DNA sequence: TTAACTGTATTAACACGAATAGTACACTAT
DNA sequence: ATAGTGTACTATTCGTGTTAATACAGTTAA
């Protein structure tokens, strides 16, 4: 369900946060779905339970999950988080765009690239 | 010429590499332009010369500069580096696109966002 | 030649944060 | 009761970015 990428330089707990964010945002983990227990996931990934706990704590702080003592951690209702997620993404897109313009890539080429991807998608 | 962003979590040397990469790619530092000396830049940025040297070493390894002992570091001819830079950027764009699709943002909205930016640009 | 610049190399130490280890406690369900 | 959950806390290890202090080598201009 969750994979660790050791080529990724970011901390493990941050990677775990990201993966669950994606799973929850995509609806793969619908509201109220139980997440793996802290200990189980730690064993499965061969990392320390504290690292999982830190990730779960972060996810709760961000509103992606809620935890019930003695029962487990569960996916939260994230409908109200979507807008802020979108805003963050468009901000990232702006950063990439700036970088592109800086090295001489035009708006048109960026758009063309996305359109090309979209076309390829349709063929599948 | 170069600024350090202490909010940026990445290492200083990596930030410096990025800044010079941008300056060179944008042509602000044309081929054979001399870069600040290791010691001067260290003083200017109030950081250790070793950190600058590490950044310069990295830039040389990447082909952005060349160094002449006793003289200084100079911007290299990067015409042949452009294609690989562009490839890297499009790869980043693909990653963002994936992320966007994952949370329900369509290709159309991405393209619209870029076009909107382009329009705003024209107004200036 | 000498002085003042350049880059380069090396070693040691420091600082910070990620990750681990170990333990303890509280709650829930069977 | 037992075994599963989450939570809290402290101590330690470990990696690595950064600093510090020198030393050496090449270039340039007085």
Image: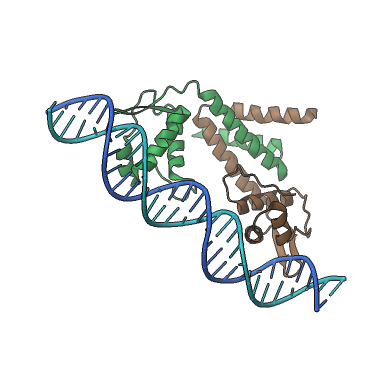
Chain colours: A brown, B green, C cyan, D blue
- What is the x, y in percent for residue C4? 19, 35
Whether residue B1 is visible here, answered yes or no, is no
Q: Is residue C27 above or below residue D16?
A: below
Residue at (74, 48) in percent of width and height: A26
Of residues A78 and B74, the one nearer the viewer is B74
Residue at (33, 37) in percent of width and height: B38
Residue at (60, 26) in percent of width and height: A109
Of residues A108 and A58, the one nearer the viewer is A58
* Count of numbered circles in the view: 0
Of residues A50 and D12, the one nearer the viewer is D12
Q: Is residue A84 above or below residue A53?
A: above
Of residues D9 and A19, the one nearer the viewer is D9
Image-quadrant location for residue C8: top left
- What is the x, y in percent for residue B58? 44, 34
Residue at (47, 29) in percent of width and height: B62
- What is the x, y in percent for residue A27? 77, 50
Image-quadrant location for residue B87: top right
- What is the x, y in percent for residue A63? 67, 59
Horizontal side of residue A95 vs B12, given as left or right = right
Q: Is residue A26 above or below residue C14?
A: above
The N terminus of chain B: image quadrant: top left
């Amino acid at each position: 369900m969750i994979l660790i990428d050791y080529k990724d330089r970011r901390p493990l707990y941050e990677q775990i946060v990201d993966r669950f964010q994606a799973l929850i945002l995509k609806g793969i983990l619908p509201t109220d779905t139980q997440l793996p227990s802290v200990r189980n996931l730690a064993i499965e990934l061969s990392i320390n339970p504290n690292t999982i706990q830190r990730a779960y704590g972060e996810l709760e702080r961000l509103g992606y999950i809620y935890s019930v003592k003695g029962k487990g951690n569960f996916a939260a209702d994230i409908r109200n988080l979507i807008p802020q997620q979108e805003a963050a993404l468009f901000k990232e897109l702006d950063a990439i765009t700036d970088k592109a313009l800086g090295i001489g890539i035009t708006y048109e080429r960026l758009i063309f690239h996305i359109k090309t991807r979209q076309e390829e998608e349709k063929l599948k």
